[in-house]
Amino acid sequence: MGEMVFPSGCKGKLFSGEEPERARGPNLYALWADEFCSWKYQKATWDMLMFSLRKGASQTCITTTPKPSKLWREIQARDTSRVIKMRTYDNIANLSRAYIENIIKPYEGTTLGRQELDAEDLDNVDGALWTHELIEKYRWPSDKPLPNFTTVLIPIDPAATSKDTSDEAGIIPVAKAPCNCKGETQLHAFVLADYTLRGTPDQWAGAAINAMKQHHGDAIIGEANNGGEMVSTIIRYAAAERKMSIPCRLVWASDGKQTRATPIQMLYEQGKVHHVGNVPLLEDEMTTWIPGVGRSPNRIDSLVWGITELRLQSGSFFK
Ligand SMILES: [Zn+2]
């Protein structure tokens, strides 16, 4: 990746959690692993870096928001590890008022806030539909080639209003493909990435169009009775500005949020949904949202829309 040279002549090499193979080969004296729990391919990248850490005292410093991955628990439990926990509030004197108002306040008193602000290692949250173990169990291995996707959808759950800057537009691309992971061919769903953002309609339309290009999407989809008309109008406008033609479809909701989310959770339990790499913020929402308590987060809404639409297109999804 990149290289940093310090005034002393000491060199630092930069690697990415998205590209484990790039970490193959160097001879490192020390490692600083930042935001370790959010690396896309955490285990594969870590293993590769450990092979490279073969000089001097071979020390590693990990700085991260804690998230309950198996590897993170295992590293903390080692006799040779020293764990120091700090809360966001310990650093409050250095934070801007805008950060405190817009970022810290909304999380206060929430389960996710315990992780994000208080550095608590959350175990499974009672009442949440998903667990980390369930997502982890069927995560697509980083070294295994992906099957050929037959459909790729980019679902958008728009922010409540275009002026609502505190709300995010959920954009979670999903795909389906014939999959042999169970020893027979079944249609399975794949969760590809997270393009969710807090921004203007033009920004989220741009992010969705970018996702279409990156993942060779078939269509952008929006929920008809939750701002769907707005989604299609804005996408059409944003696409025209970019001199592109982007298919945008509306899907219809007949059930409540929890009713829609439950069959999708069942597909996870049946091992029919694979996350491609780590999708950390989506997985945070999935493992901390308790149906009926507060509105469902936008990433989950986007995910549920996307997989519901994939499932409706193919009856064999449930077999
Ligand atoms: Zn599969």
Image (cartoon, rainbow, N blue to C red):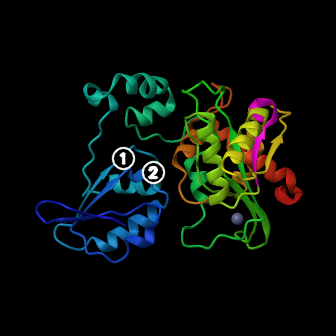
Residue 127 seen by the camera = no
Q: Earlier in the sequence, mark 1 or mark 2?
A: 2
Q: Position of residue 116 (x, y in %)?
A: 42, 36
Name the kind of residue labelled 1 in the image: Thr
Name the kind of residue labelled 2 in the image: Ser
Q: Is residue 243 above or below residue 25?
A: above
Residue holding disc 1:
64
Q: CA distance from mark 1 to mark 2?
A: 8 Å
Hey, which quadrant is residue 2 in on the image?
bottom left
Ligand 1 position by quadrant: bottom right
Q: Position of residue 38 (x, y in %)?
A: 45, 51
Residue holding disc 2:
38
Q: Is residue 94 magenta?
A: no
SS class, disc 2: helix
Q: Sort mark 2 into few (<14), some (14-19) or many (20+) by Cα contacts within 10 Å.
A: some
Instruction: Classify residue 55 as left or right of residue 183.
Output: left
Magenta span covers which residues? 219-228
User: In the image shown, does 163 or 14 lie closer to the viewer?
Assistant: 163
Q: Position of residue 28 (x, y in %)?
A: 24, 70
User: In the image shown, does 8 or 174 lie closer to the viewer?
Assistant: 8
SS class, disc 1: loop
| Residue contact between numbered discs 1 and 2, judged by CB atoms under 8 Å | yes
